[in-house]
Amino acid sequence: MADYGGGNYMDNIVFELKDVYFSYLGKFPALCGLDIKINRGQKISIIGANGSGKSTFLQMLDGLIFADKGSVSFYGQQLNEKKFNDCKFSQDFRSKVGFIFQNSDVQLFCPTVKEDIVFGPLQLGVEKDQIKKRLEKLCAALKIEELLERPVYQLSIGEKRKVAIASTLIIDPQILILDEPTAGLDPLTTRNIVDLLIEENNAGKTIITATHDLHIVDEVSDIVYVFGQQRSVVKSGTAADILNDLALLQENNLVHIHSHRHKGRVHIHPHLHSGHYVDDHQ
């Protein structure tokens, strides 16, 4: 397999998008003029209202769709249909890039949880004893040992999300791409997933997360990109830069204004759409 990367991650560009456009059916714009560079080992978050292009962007990084205009590169190699027709490149890419869909049912299709989790590494030719070790470690980390022999349709949303994450992590990819990984989950499951992402990043993995849960953004981000209704980046910066910019969040439908009457006066407060962010540095 090709040896991508190496050395200090700041010198290694994993993904680079230059003036990227994409539209569905050639007439419904989804991405308009994206210029984004993601370095090896970074934690990147994508936030924005529904319809701003977040999921489309992630699918493009995963090689599921391709730019109509502009270029998308992976360690300097252009991502296009022709490239993925090369079996060697495709297998190498799939072993290095793991995608966790927003809808876990898209990923889970085997009769049992265990079969779903081990499906990927078996297809990639990972040795069975190595798969067993990885399976045991992931099941302990995600607390899903008791689910292994169950059919997926019997699982809750949170359990399915954990299984989908396990089925991706067991491949041991260098890059993790996650679409709304904590949507609809209880606080404990959310905490477990965030802790796992931080652990994976500390081990050197690049983490790219699209999320509406603004309360996790500080922990899963070195850089945050805000996608606007024009399907382009309206601002990027650290989590503190972005989350403390109330006007930016309001303009892009990431917070709403709540008013209430107290002692004869109307008070107006901003509310995050999901969770609450507290800047510990203030």
Image (spheres, grey):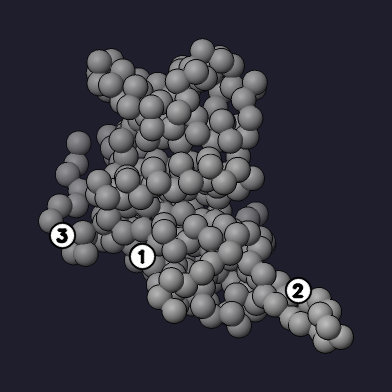
Q: Nearer the viewer, residue 275 or 68?
A: 275
Q: Residue 139 is drawn in which quadrant? A: top left
Residue 7 visible in the snapshot: yes
Q: Earlier in the sequence, mark 2 or mark 1?
A: 1
Image height check: is 166 above or below 148?
A: below
Report the amino acid beneath label 3: Asn
Look at discs 3 and 1 and give the one toward the viewer: 1
**Residue matched to label 2:** 258
x, y (%) of residue 220? 41, 57
Look at discs 2 and 1 and give the one toward the viewer: 2
Report the amino acid beneath label 1: Asp
Q: Which residue is farthest bottom?
A: 265
Q: Earlier in the sequence, mark 3 or mark 2?
A: 3
Q: Nearer the viewer, residue 99 or 257?
A: 257
**Residue matched to label 1:** 222
User: What is the secondary structure assignment of the residue under circle 2?
Assistant: strand
The residue sitting at 57% across, 46% down in the picture is: 187
The residue sitting at 40% across, 75% down in the picture is: 281
x, y (%) of residue 105? 60, 32
Label at residue 8: 3
Report the amino acid beneath label 2: His
Left or right: 242, with 246 as reference point: left
User: What is the secondary structure assignment of the residue under circle 1?
Assistant: loop
